[in-house]
Image (spheres, rainbow, N blue to C red):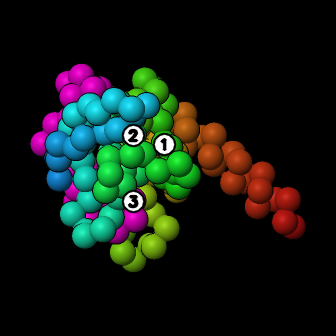
Amino acid sequence: MSATQPSEDLHVLCHEHHLEMKLKRNCLNSEGAKTQVIAFGCIEPDCFVHYSTSRGYFLLNQNGNKDGIEMVPKIRCFLDGVPMYLAGINPEKRGFRLWCCPQCGARRTNEEDLIGLAPQEIQDLGKKNAGQSKHADMSHV
């Protein structure tokens, strides 16, 4: 799948409301010219949060203008640089976020930066984390 073509197979969540977003056709006013953009939009009334695979999360007001101050997450894939989307939350851990890449499928969380690594990479990462934990535990003694 191309990074510029949104897919209905993606389950993109609004970063504000944590609701699944739907593909929408929007008119975008940019520098005096109107262009049509297909992007995911939040289903919550009066929410301006949108996501596209090429631009990531952005705010689009009712006039089709991008809001000047964008308070949106800007998480990029560590493999290909594509803007990632919020794919999951955990109600029991309010701060947990699962981010996915629409192009390569890589995943990351805010708790453990990388998910879906190859077995050897997981083993290497585990050894590195164990070494850091052991060092951190000893420093408190």
Q: Please rate how many residues cluster around mark 2, counting C-alpha atoms within 10 Å: few if below 14, some from 14 to 19, many from 20.
A: some
Q: Please rate how many residues cluster around mark 1, counting C-alpha atoms within 10 Å: few if below 14, some from 14 to 19, many from 20.
A: some
Q: Quadrant of residue 27?
A: top left
Which is more toward the observer, 67 or 91?
Answer: 67
Q: Position of residue 51 (x, y in %)?
A: 32, 45
The magenta stretch spans which residues?
A: 1-21
Residue pictured at 82% horizontal, 59% vertical: 138
Whether residue 121 is in magenta: the answer is no
Q: Position of residue 52 (x, y in %)?
A: 31, 39
Which is more toward the observer, 32 or 38?
Answer: 32
Q: Under tag 1, what secondary structure? A: loop
Which is more toward the observer, 32 or 23?
Answer: 32
Residue pictured at 78% horizontal, 51% vertical: 135
Q: Height in image: 41 above or below 18?
A: above
Circle 2 residue: 56
Whether residue 17 is in magenta: the answer is yes
Q: Height in image: 19 above or below 9?
A: below
Q: Under tag 2, what secondary structure? A: strand
Q: Amino acid at mark 2?
A: Gly
Q: Amino acid at mark 1?
A: Ile
